[in-house]
Image (cartoon, rainbow, N blue to C red):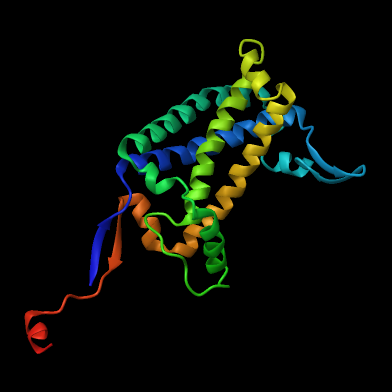
Amino acid sequence: MKLIKEKHSLAMRWAHWVNFPLLGIMIWSGLLIYWANDVYEFTIFGHRFIKFFPEWFYQLLHIPHRLSEGMAFHFLFMWFFTLNGIFYVIYTLISGEWRELWPQKRSFKEAWLVLLHDLHLRKTAPPQGKYNSAQRIVYSAIILMGVGSVLTGLAIYKPVQLYWLTWLMGGYHLARIWHFVLTLGYVFFFVIHIIQVILAGWNNFRSVISGFEVVNEPDKPTNHEEAKN
């Protein structure tokens, strides 16, 4: 028997779908800013393995010479990104949903079992509630990454006025590095998240839109069947 069960609240869905375009705008505008001084690369013993980013990447996205545009978008939408994050954190605290979101003691052990199950190396997944152990860890980490992005961003944005924050972030250059690394983390999370959504199927995706999911429950025996037993 199929039943319709509530899974995600309106506040959670609102924060999720608002955050998606906001984060996209922040990454895009951040690239416009980064192009003006793209100094980061991965080298070992003087040999460059990765350059962030190759010239064709900038040309493909029409990024060059749009610094002022990038700064305007980045510094405007960062406030919406911050307010949406604050709203979501306050909601989880007041509603008590943080209990279903925050990792438990066994979460780090069970997350490995979830990974093995997703890779089809383990037949059964560990028991879960609204979120499995891997989701608890990742979704909580994303919240902490958002806090880190805001703090390091402010340290870069106002290094003189907020000198104490810049100092706490390790100085201007280190704050910029952390800001860049967190951005790469968002991109990595987005790719993994999309893959997980596809693997989870339509029912899971639908619940993030409507708030409800369809679950299969065993049919209850009728009075006639109970009498036979």
Q: From the viewer's side, name the closer residue of 171 and 202.
A: 171
Q: Is residue 80 left or right of residue 156?
A: left
Q: Is residue 24 left or right of residue 203?
A: right
Q: From the viewer's side, name the closer residue of 140 and 210.
A: 140
Residue sitting farthest toward the top: 161
Q: Position of residue 155 (x, y in %)?
A: 63, 21
Residue sitting at x 78%, y 35%: 40
Q: Decide if residue 209 is in sight here.
A: yes
Residue sitting at x 38%, y 48%: 100
Count the marks: 0
- Quadrant occupied by the C terminus: bottom left
210 in relation to 228, above or below: above
Residue sitting at x 43%, y 31%: 84
Q: Is residue 51 left or right of residue 164?
A: right
52 in relation to 189, above or below: above
Residue sitting farthest toward the bottom: 228
- Please identify the quarter of the rendering in which residue 215 is found: bottom left
Q: Position of residue 73 (x, y in %)?
A: 56, 26
Q: Position of residue 3 (x, y in %)?
A: 23, 65
Residue sitting farthest toward the front: 105
Q: Position of residue 32 (x, y in %)?
A: 66, 31
Q: Decide if residue 156 is in sight here.
A: no
142 in relation to 35, above or below: below
- Quadrant occupied by the N terminus: bottom left
Q: Is residue 185 left or right of residue 89?
A: right
- Please identify the quarter of the rendering in which residue 47 is found: top right
Residue sitting at x 69%, y 28%: 176
